[in-house]
Image (tube, coloured by chain):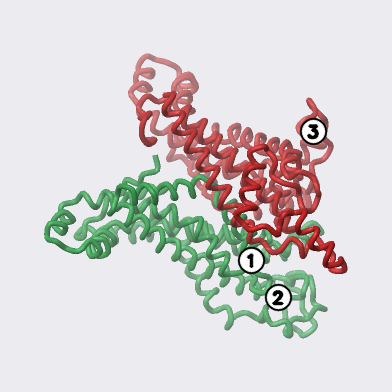
Chain colours: A red, B green
Amino acid sequence: MTAYILQRLIQSVLVLLAVSVVVFLAVYGIGDPIELLVPPQVSAAERTAMIQRLGLDLPVWQQYLGFLGKALKGDLGLSFVHGVPAVDLILARLPATFELVLLAMSLAAIIGIPLGLLAGLNPESRPSRAIMAGTILGFSLPSFWKGMMLILLFSVFLGWLPTAGRGETVSVLGIPTSLLTLDGLKHLALPALNLAIPNMALMIRLVAAGTTEAMTQDYVKYARAKGVRRKRIIGRHVLRNILIPVVTVAGMEFGSLVAFSTITETVFAWPGMGKLLIDSIYQLDRPVVVAYVMLATLLFVAVNFLVDILYAALDPRVKLTGEMA
Amino acid sequence: MIASKTAPVAADADTALRHKVLRRIKSRPTTRGAVILLGVLLLLALLAPFIAPQNPHDLASLSVMDNRLEPGAQGMTGITYWLGTDAQGRDMLSAILYGLRTSLLVGLTSTAGALAIGVLAGLVAAQFGGAVDAAIMRVVDFMLGFPSILIALVLLASIGRGVDKVIIAIILVQWAQYARLMRAAALVERRKEYIEAAVNFGLPTRHIMLAHLLPNSISSVLVVSTISIAGAITLEATLSFLGVGVPVTQPSLGLLIANGFEFLLSGEYWIAAFPGIALVLLIMSLNLVGERLRRSFNVRGQ
């Protein structure tokens, strides 16, 4: 087990290194930030000083090594636009994104699991077919379009919910959150629902497939023959068995929800990390883009690492020395 | 986990299966509707320059006086705007027909490109195995480990917007899934006796790969590619919406929606809603057809 963990750890570090090289080179290609940052009337000397101060005159590889050295100390450079450390800028936006993602995941589970169970128990019935057709819709509607339609329906036509921003926040242990105020929740409702829909569809699919399969298993037949009530069979035996893959997938989807929140945050002007990324791309704020990608990669790699280790620990069939099954 | 367990289609069963699939598509009303809808959308996109009431790219034919007119309103020149106009006084119906062209162009071209690269990579990985296989599959794992939207976003942020650049970005994020599917299918195929016979016969490796392995293992990949076209179109629309996709001079459906977003809040819904409906119809019909094909061929993709 230790050898396996070590091996996966080395792999994870290699992935991070590879991403740092690729991203640095890719982002290095973004148009000249000096054009944007220095007003045209500034003298040539001041301009040169500015270029030197930002280290933009050095060769690419030297810029990269400097970047890597600092990155290891948690310093991913100053934002060109805001003049503050890029990491701080992103971390300040982190709570907004995380509360959005967490609420979306909860919504997906709370709505998705019962619907999936319903669809899986009677796969041929009319409501089940409707639910499964709905999941295709949930998968295929583009996220930004869905968000706009939610705004159109709930904000423009019905006037129930606000269209943008985070609303009133309260501080819990120094972290601002919208989850605890009514105004905050109202602002949170539409973006969280929008982010949750594809995941909800995924949950429904997983649970429905698992339920249909589990109902034909011997342990269910045995429980039935024993005279166990249907409710108890479903709640105690079926649900327990299908929740393992559901939890695994939910964990793995966490990273992609953070990435997809970029779109939802843009539509709803939600002040999270994703909105920051898009704004930084517009403003050619290179350090913030690089820092975002590095932090996101760190998150994905960490989540994948944990999921793999948990998998190996829980499932004895996974070979610990070689590749994952 | 993700390995595709495609039962490869033997040559004699091929026609029979094809008939079965066609029959199934015909017998399902939803699928039949989707096929017809898809055909109509393709035709509209193809014929856009001939049937559009206006050339939305020709600024001279636009009248700014007609900006943001409601659907069905009549313009200064007597033209009726059935789907309303945008902020520049552009007829939305024409803009949608041309936008459909851009969306389909990007979706089809990028899928074809990703398919070519992915199939080749998967084939090479399966044929040569060992270090080559390991190297290719590590790259594939690496690519699939990240959400496609993030890779495409960062790439486009660095190379700038443009139809060709969006296509490159989508190829980059989509080739890996084809490579994985192709490798899995080719590995199954390679164990068959006819390949062994061909090897013993002394046929050159390139010939075995291209004339035997490729045609016999590509079906599952092709089936999945229908759904991937929808994915590519969605990705393009999303990137254009975020402002890093196609240029304003050649708006796709996604960009049209983005342009209408700011007017949505004031109730001028048509600028964003109609291109959105066109996009959703396109994606849904592709998905329904693709999903039916996938089920009929019994391919377990992704």
Q: How many marks?
A: 3
Pointer 3 residue: A176
- Horizontal side of residue B58 vs A121, given as left or right: right
CA gap, disc 2 and disc 3? 46 Å
Image coordinates for residue B301, horizontal then vertical, percent = 40, 49
Residue at 39 percent across and 35 percent down: it is A324
**Residue A221 location, x and y as percent?**
35, 22
Disc 2 is placed on an element classified as loop
Rendering quarter of residue B93: bottom right
Q: In the image, which is nearer the foreground, mark 3 or mark 1?
A: 1
Residue at 63% in and 56% down: A27
| SS for callout 3 | strand
Specify whether A134 is left or right of B121. right
Q: Is residue B208 above or below residue A240?
A: below
Q: Nearer the viewer, residue B106 or A68?
A: A68
* Label disc, if present, on residue B91 of the rendered structure: 2
Q: Is residue A233 visible?
A: yes
Residue pointed to by mark 1: B161
Find out whether the residues at labels 2 and 1 contact each other: C-beta distance under 8 Å: no
Mark 2 or 1, closer to the camera: 1
